[in-house]
Image: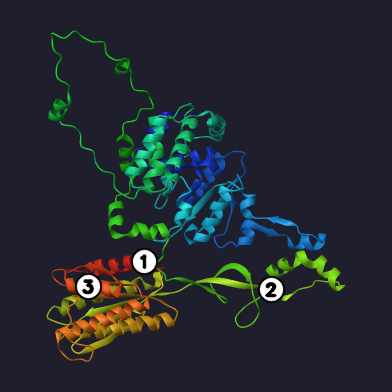
């Protein structure tokens, strides 16, 4: 029989991740549509297979979820025309889509990190409309940067983290299908007191969770936990469980620690002793009341959240990875529509010719409803196709990114700057294949700028080119900016998504014509920055001076670039900074 001890025993440390995942599966089996589903962070393996098997067992005689490919088309997803039945019957025959078929029974989405924002929007519209359901997503991303769309994650209550769990830790489920079925029957009679609701809302706010769905899902998780515990009213244990399973993984900030009152503080807060000459008064009736079971201390749920927050949450927030994760960014460039290659999109009406390819099935579906009318009009038999019926295949193609470093190689500190730039470029190249990025390097010194490393993914070539990079001389900043803009525009014409990283202190002393003179050099640099801004190429200016320079900050404003003062940039820090800023600037 289920009891509160199995729920209350969820503590960290020790990190009983499998027990937490099993509780999520049991709660989802009790109220799948209300809780929206779960997004499993796990690659194919025993832990993921066992979780899915346990969930199918827990739902008992309920229909098992259907499987949905991540690149599913709109017609298969939303429904459309049954071509063969329409041609046979001579009238339109509706073919139900996967969302309609899965209403109330759920879907399983493999490779959920590849799902598009459009797919998430279609699923959400179906759930809010005629076909409410739930989703079990399988997040198989190689890194935390590869994540499902934020709109999809927002609708799911749970996110079990199953990576790295050994088979020895895969204990049997703490609940049986009979217990889950009984809890599902009790669910409509379960109540969640207002104090519990208020506590969950306050906890979500303290964790910096902007979504209004999060506390709603937490309340529903508390109801399901109450039903599993054979109780009618949610209390502290259920609220704490909902915080751990639903709210903690959504945290956007570290909850503040609340300091306990010292004895001196409590003494100051205590009322003065009564006057012995004053007759005693009856205490108000409310003073004699004891707190109800639903009264939850405000810090209790925050402590439950702290117990399961990932230890690297603060580091991720400081590094800016939370935004990339929420968008499901992979570091690739902007997307475009292609007629030849890429991930399939829904077909669209169009004309044949050039690279356009006919989608025969979609064309036949478009023509089928009009066949009886056309036969009566023309007196001809057979299948009558008109140009308006043509449907053209389309594909989504992701462009490669081009990260271009423009490095100030002038002055006595040039060797230190160039050494860090070399390290950063090599780090970027080592990760270029996974991120589909190319990296280039431009150095400016003396009386002009020079392309040290054309756009490449070759780590061997990069090391060879970077090995003999010279430094010293004047600062022709305008020449470096113009050459960086030229390389970026060339990359854009080649179908890449360029991003510019300029490392300088912003103090130019060589003009565009190669002549010395600080006033003219700064004027030329400002004109070059404005020209770069006109191209619309995203950029960051990294101030490498020992102290932040106003000239560098002003120049970044003229460029329309983000300004970062980083006088002691290491290779690791520089590489991480450029990657995070380039993601923030992506379309």
Classify 284 as above or below 138: above
The image quadrant of residue 333 is bottom left
At which x and y percent is residue 39? 47, 50
Say which residue label 1 marks: 583
Q: Is residue 293 among what the camera can see? A: yes
Say which residue label 2 marks: 390
Cα–Cα gap, marks 1 and 2: 38 Å
436 left or right of 469? right
Q: Nearer the viewer, mark 3 or mark 1?
A: 3
Secondary structure at badge 3 equals helix
Mark 1 or 2 closer to N-term? 2
Secondary structure at badge 2 equals loop
Cα–Cα gap, marks 3 and 2: 55 Å
At which x and y percent is residue 119? 54, 59
Q: Nearer the viewer, mark 3 or mark 2?
A: 3
At which x and y percent is residue 335? 47, 70
Q: Residue at x 16, y 84 (%)?
A: 519
Q: In this rendered view, identify the residue nearer to me: 52 or 89.
A: 89
- Neighbour tally class for label 1: few under 14, some 14-19, many 20 plus, Cα within 10 Å: many
Classify 273 as above or below 462: above
The image quadrant of residue 391 is bottom right
Q: In this rendered view, identify the residue nearer to me: 145 or 215.
A: 215
392 left or right of 427? right
- Neighbour tally class for label 2: few under 14, some 14-19, many 20 plus, Cα within 10 Å: many
Say which residue label 3 marks: 554
């Amino acid at each position: 029989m289920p009891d509160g001890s199995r729920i209350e025993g969820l503590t960290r440390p020790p990190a009983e991740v499998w027990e937490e995942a099993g509780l999520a599966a049991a709660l989802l089996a009790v109220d799948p549509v209300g809780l929206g589903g779960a997004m499993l962070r796990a690659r194919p393996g025993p832990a993921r297979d066992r979780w899915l098997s346990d969930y199918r067992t827990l739902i008992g005689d309920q229909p098992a979820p259907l499987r949905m490919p991540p690149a599913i088309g709109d017609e298969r997803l939303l429904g459309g025309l049954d071509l063969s039945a329409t041609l046979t019957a001579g009238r339109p025959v509706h073919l139900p889509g996967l969302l309609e078929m899965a209403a109330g029974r759920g879907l399983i989405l493999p490779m959920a990190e590849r799902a598009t924002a459009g797919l998430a929007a279609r699923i959400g519209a179906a759930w809010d409309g005629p076909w409410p359901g739930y989703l079990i997503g399988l997040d198989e991303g190689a890194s935390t940067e590869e994540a499902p769309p934020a709109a999809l994650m927002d609708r799911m209550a749970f996110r079990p983290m199953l990576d790295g769990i050994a088979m020895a830790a895969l204990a049997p489920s703490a609940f049986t299908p009979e217990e889950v079925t009984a809890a599902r029957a009790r669910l409509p009679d379960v109540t969640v007191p207002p104090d519990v609701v208020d506590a969950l809302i306050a906890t979500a706010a303290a964790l910096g969770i902007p979504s209004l769905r999060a506390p709603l899902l937490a309340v529903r998780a508390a109801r399901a936990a109450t039903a599993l515990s054979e109780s009618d009213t949610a209390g502290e244990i259920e609220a704490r469980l909902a915080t751990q399973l639903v709210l903690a993984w959504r945290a956007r900030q570290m909850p503040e620690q609340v300091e306990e009152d010292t004895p001196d503080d409590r003494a100051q807060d205590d009322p003065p002793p009564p006057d012995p000459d004053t007759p005693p008064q009856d205490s108000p009736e409310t003073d004699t009341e004891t707190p109800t079971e639903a009264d939850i201390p405000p810090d209790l749920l925050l402590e439950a959240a702290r117990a399961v927050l990932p230890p690297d949450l603060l580091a991720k927030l400081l590094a800016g990875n939370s935004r990339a994760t929420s968008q499901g960014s992979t570091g690739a460039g902007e997307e475009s529509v292609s007629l030849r290659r890429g991930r399939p999109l829904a077909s669209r009406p169009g004309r044949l010719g050039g690279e356009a390819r006919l989608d025969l099935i979609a064309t036949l579906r478009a023509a089928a409803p009009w066949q009886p009318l056309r036969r009566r009009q023309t007196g001809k038999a057979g299948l009558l196709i008109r140009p308006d019926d043509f449907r053209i295949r389309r594909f989504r193609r992701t462009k490669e990114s081009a990260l271009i470093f423009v490095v100030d190689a002038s002055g006595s500190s040039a060797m230190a700057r160039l050494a860090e730039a070399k390290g950063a470029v090599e780090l970027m190249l080592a990760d270029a294949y996974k991120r589909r990025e190319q990296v280039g390097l431009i150095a400016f010194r003396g009386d002009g700028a020079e392309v040290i490393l054309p756009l490449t993914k070759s780590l061997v070539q990069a090391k060879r080119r970077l090995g003999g990079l010279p430094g010293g001389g004047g600062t022709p900043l305008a020449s470096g900016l113009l050459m960086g803009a030229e390389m970026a525009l060339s990359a854009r014409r080649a179908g890449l998504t360029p991003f510019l990283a300029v490392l300088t202190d912003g103090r130019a002393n060589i003009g565009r014509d190669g002549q010395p003179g600080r006033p003219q050099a700064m004027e030329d640099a400002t004109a070059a920055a404005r020209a770069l801004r006109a191209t619309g190429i995203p950029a960051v200016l990294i101030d490498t001076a020992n102290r932040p320079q106003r000239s560098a900050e002003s120049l970044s404003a003229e460029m329309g670039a983000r300004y970062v003062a980083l006088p002691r940039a290491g290779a690791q820090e520089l590489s991480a900074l450029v990657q995070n800023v380039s993601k923030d600037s992506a379309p």
